[in-house]
Image (cartoon, rainbow, N blue to C red):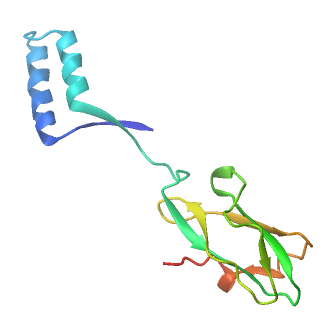
Amino acid sequence: MVKRRYRTEASEAIHSAASALAQASVIDRKAMREYDELCIEEVRESTANDVNATVSARVKNSTSADYRVHVFDLFGGGRVEVQGSPFSLSEGDASPAFALRANATGAGAMAYACDAGPSLSDISVVNGEIKVIT
């Protein structure tokens, strides 16, 4: 959604004065459009699906076998393999931290798959959730 706002407080005062002059027919519509362009800007408002942040996460192999794990960033309906993926994880190993796209509140989405195909309960996100690393 696009919203209009004054560029500065001074531009708001100037535009207000120009509007009064236009209503009194002292300046024409063309001049008023020029004041609009100088004083008002259009700003696109962020939505919940806009990428405004990134969070760092890791995956951990909690199985008793070695796996190659592919990790995907699912934010905004896409499916993009994260940088560094696939990760070769031995028993108990955690991947290096990787970035996931997120909205302004830090909410994102990810998925992972293993070449050998263990069940989702066999490979877990560190501490049972995406861990934000500061």
Q: Quadrant of residue 123?
A: bottom right
- Left or right: residue 77 versus residue 38 is right
105 or 20: which is nearer to us? Answer: 105
Query: What residue lies at 15% left-to-right and 28% top-to-bottom?
Result: 15
Which corner quadrant holds the N terminus? Answer: top left
Q: Position of residue 90 (x, y in %)?
A: 81, 85
For residue 43, side relative to residue 30 (left or right): right
Residue 36 or 123: which is nearer the viewer?
Answer: 123
Instruction: Give the total of numbered labels.
Output: 0
Residue in the picture at 8% in, 13% down: 24
Q: Classify residue 67 as left or right of residue 49.
A: right
Query: Where residue 39 sits in the image (x, y, percent)?
Result: 20, 30
Quadrant in the picture for residue 25: top left
Up-down relation of residue 22 to residue 60 (above or below): above
Question: Residue 105: x, y in percent?
Answer: 48, 64
- Residue 74 is situated, as x and y percent measured from the top left of the image, at 68, 58
- Give the residue drawn at x 42%, y 44%: 45
